[in-house]
Amino acid sequence: MRNLVLGILVGIGGACLYFIGGTPAWYVWGLYALGAASIVFSFDILFGSLEEHEPRAAILGFCMFLIPGTLLMGAVLKLGF
């Protein structure tokens, strides 16, 4: 269920980038895909590691992929809109 919610949020973000922002450059879509994949993967690591009772791996993996994903999404917001 959480993967569905994350997929819907990524789709809404892509639609906003497409409809609201005008015409973004081709590389903005690549940055968006990498940033969204990194953020979704960080949540997948967090929930998967917590289900396996590995809290340290959950936090480290979450931060390792969330921080670059957030920076990429910030670049997308700066370049795309």
Image (cartoon, grey):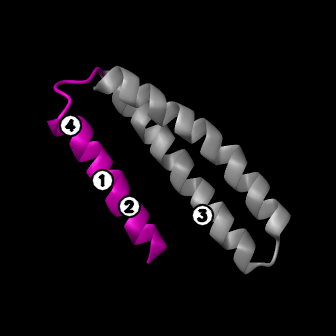
Of helix, strand and loop, which one carries label 3?
helix
Q: Amino acid at mark 4?
A: Tyr
Category of crowding for the residue at label 4, using alpha-carbon neighbours closer than 10 angstroms: few (below 14), some (14–19), many (at least 20): some
Tags 2 and 4 in contact by the CB under 8 Å rule?
no
**Helix, strand, or loop for circle 2?**
helix
Q: Which residue is mark 3?
A: 44
Q: Which residues are magenta?
A: 1-25
Are discs 2 and 1 less than 8 Å apart at CB?
Answer: yes
**Tag 4 near tag 3, CB within 8 Å:** no
Q: Which residue is mark 1?
A: 11
Mark carried by residue 18: 4
Position of residue 14 relative to residue 77, above or below, is: below
Pointer 2: residues within 10 angstroms few (<14), some, or many (20+)? some
Inspect the image, locate mark 2, and give the three-letter code of the amino acid beneath it.
Gly
C-alpha span from label 2 to label 4: 16 Å
- Magenta-span inclusion, residue 69: no
Quarter of the picture holding the N terminus: bottom left
Is residue 40 rendered to the left or right of residue 12? right
